[in-house]
Image (tube, rainbow, N blue to C red):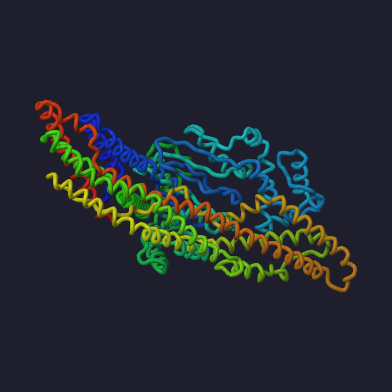
Amino acid sequence: MHDPRTIDVKTNLSGQVEVLSALILELAALFPGGTQQAEHWRRILENLQTHFSEDRCRVAVVGTVKSGKSTLINSLLGRDLLKRGAGIVTAMITRVESGSRLQALLLFKNWEEVNGELNSALSFFPSPMLLERKGAFDIRRQADRELLVGVLAQVNQDQLLSQDMMDKNYVLVQSFLEGYSSIQEFLDEGRQRLELSEDQVVRHQQMVAHEALAVYLRDARLTAPFPWPAQGMELGDCQGSDSPIPQHLAQVQNYLIGADLVIYVISSRVGLRQADYKFLTDLKRMRLWDNCVFVINLDLNELEDATAAQKLVQRWQRELAAFQAEPPVFAFSALDNLLNRLKQQGVSLTPKDLGKLLTWESDAASTEFSRNEAARFEGYLREMLANRQTRLLLSGSLGQLQTVSQGVREWIALQNAFLSDNVAAFQTARERLERRRWPLESLMSSLGSAMQGGVQELKLELRQRLDRFFDFRHGDIGPIITRFIENYEGSLETLEIGEQVSAFMSGVYLVYQTFQQRLLLFLTEEINLKILDFIRLQEEWLQKRLTQVLEPLLSPLQDALNLYYQEIEGLGIPATAPRVATSPWTKPEALQPKLFSLEISLSWRIRSEALLRFGINLVGEALGRLKKLWRKQASKPKPDRLRASLADALQTIKTQTLGEMAASLLDYNEGLKFRYFFPLLEHLAQSQESALKSSLTALLLDFEGFQEALTEQSHQKAERRQQLVDLARRLEQLETASAALAAAASQVG
């Protein structure tokens, strides 16, 4: 049972738009010479319909690794669509959109991206075979592939697998080599998109599960029918928030920037850990806490009874209350919900899955509790999404619909009044209205130039604000990055190291990889969030300043519109001038700020050849110095001599990285200006200008076609008046329905 306040706003509004469009067509047919006004109204309504179809609600499903995120999404869909347990190296955010049929779109990396990642992974790779390398690797060259096979065979694999950071690069290179023969022909043809129909979607699971193919994937987007109304909804299956790879957390942050709702999944077996509390704090810093809902994914095998489940809910409500009073918490088994739905659909379950269901259902109370909670969660989710849709669409769309409706109503009234007059009276009235119309049109024509003047001033202010914040030496984050790099010591004293010169290569590789990953983690957890907070503050400042630019322009428009409506009232037509105001501030879904740590990772991939050469040169030169000093410092323990050389190498790496960070921050600042803030400013200004002009033009009456109607015979005028009365009656019904929709929507929380 749904809350009666939850309205299918999109369907309701779309229906009203269609009715009004039909009325306008009929009205235009009555006065064929006056189609310009009707065409303007129809364009406004067509844009509304486009807005309805493009509106998307993004729901991020987050939580730690193995908490059950994919299973939860599958249970909501009622189908086993997402592959669970994707490789930790290649995990990506899989997007599932609501649609009429099942299909998949897989986007692949191009050869430049593949080679960039490959060479970046090989930077400082501990193989003497790389020291003679003069240029970057290209996986398409057979000689390079053969050399890489030898490099992997030479490296002490057991030692690599004992270190998380090194294991990632080893697996990445190995996977690229293993998957090359399967993907080569596809990428050689310049294809980067693979569309899978319903009977082919299983290939998506196969590719994601197979690391050697998954490394070539950039993105995966699925479309599937939902078992409940979910038009425009997108579920994002995010990587584990406790992934050891910083780029994964950065990708989750990147998705969260545009998320409308966050579902946080907690495993009942594990509970909340330090990684959870850290990520929850990040969500609060990103201003997403009020949009979070929590799901405790119950393990029914370990649950004593329904009372124990209720205690779990109470316990985590208390713990989460430190972040938010009375957080919405639900506890159920996502796997039970999925398997039960599949069984109800007549899907043949495996004996193992069927056995699980029978075991769980033997404890009727616990199973009933879980399934009731699942139903309660879905009801809550549907209401949240519907309410969000209501607020979003009614904040602007209903207002535009009502403006067009008012313009049509007043046009009908004037037409009806003029049909009772002679041509001379009509001409007099027309001249009076057009005298009042000209100042309005003049103000509207100058609106664009006035807005552009304000936009140029705001661009200068934006430049200054961003330059101050991103100044590497004196800004808000440059000095913080510098301190982190300068203070990083790398725990060389505790580093396990051998006693041979050959151990230097493995040691410097570990030092470099550990430093790089710690730096990326710091940039992701700290710097990204500081930048995002700064961006949000600038967005708010920008809207405030644009409002200040607009306010002096709105007052003359309102005065001119009031005088225009006084003339309409003077003709005996009851009418009230609407308030001239700014429209709701919106930005295009595709326009989102880039994250600094992701831009850094991308920069490293693009410059992978330079990084590879830097690593080879550094290792080669340091190794040469070490061999010369090996005998001269024979009195020192061999591990100490190795650590001293590693400390020198680390200092060189840190110095190089400081220079890279300064350049990267400068590039990021410029990119943020020209690829985000300036386009955002232009869009906000242009959308306000367009909305004002569109609304005012919808209210200004077009008299073309009237005079022809006045010369008709009396019986023809009578027929027209009767048709106008009928149109007015139907329009009144539409306006009553719109008012009822607005009243009901105002009750939505």
- Asked if residue 164 is positioned above or below residue 723 in the image, the reply reads below
Residue 561 coordinates in the image, percent (x, y): 24, 50
Residue 697: percent from left, percent from top: 29, 44
- Taking depth in this image into account, of 168 and 729 the one nearest to the observer is 729
Q: Measuring 88% from the left and 74% from the top, which residue is drawn there?
A: 635
Q: Is residue 708 left or right of residue 688?
A: left
Question: Does residue 129 appear to the left or right of 14 in the view shown?
Answer: right
Image quadrant assignment for residue 467? bottom right
Residue at the bottom extreme? 635
Q: Nearer the viewer, residue 566 or 425?
A: 425
Q: Nearer the viewer, residue 80 or 50?
A: 50
> Total of numbered circles in the picture?
0
Image quadrant in which the C terminus is located: bottom left
Instruction: Give coordinates of residue 730: x percent, y percent.
Output: 17, 37
As drawn, is 716 to the left or to the right of 148?
left
Q: Is residue 605 visible?
A: yes
Q: Nearer the viewer, residue 205 or 434?
A: 434
Q: Is residue 630 above or below residue 162?
A: below
> Is residue 371 something that shows in the picture?
no
Q: Position of residue 124 (x, y in %)?
A: 74, 56
Residue occupying the point 55% across, 40% down:
107
Drawn side of residue 673 relative to residue 9, left or right: right
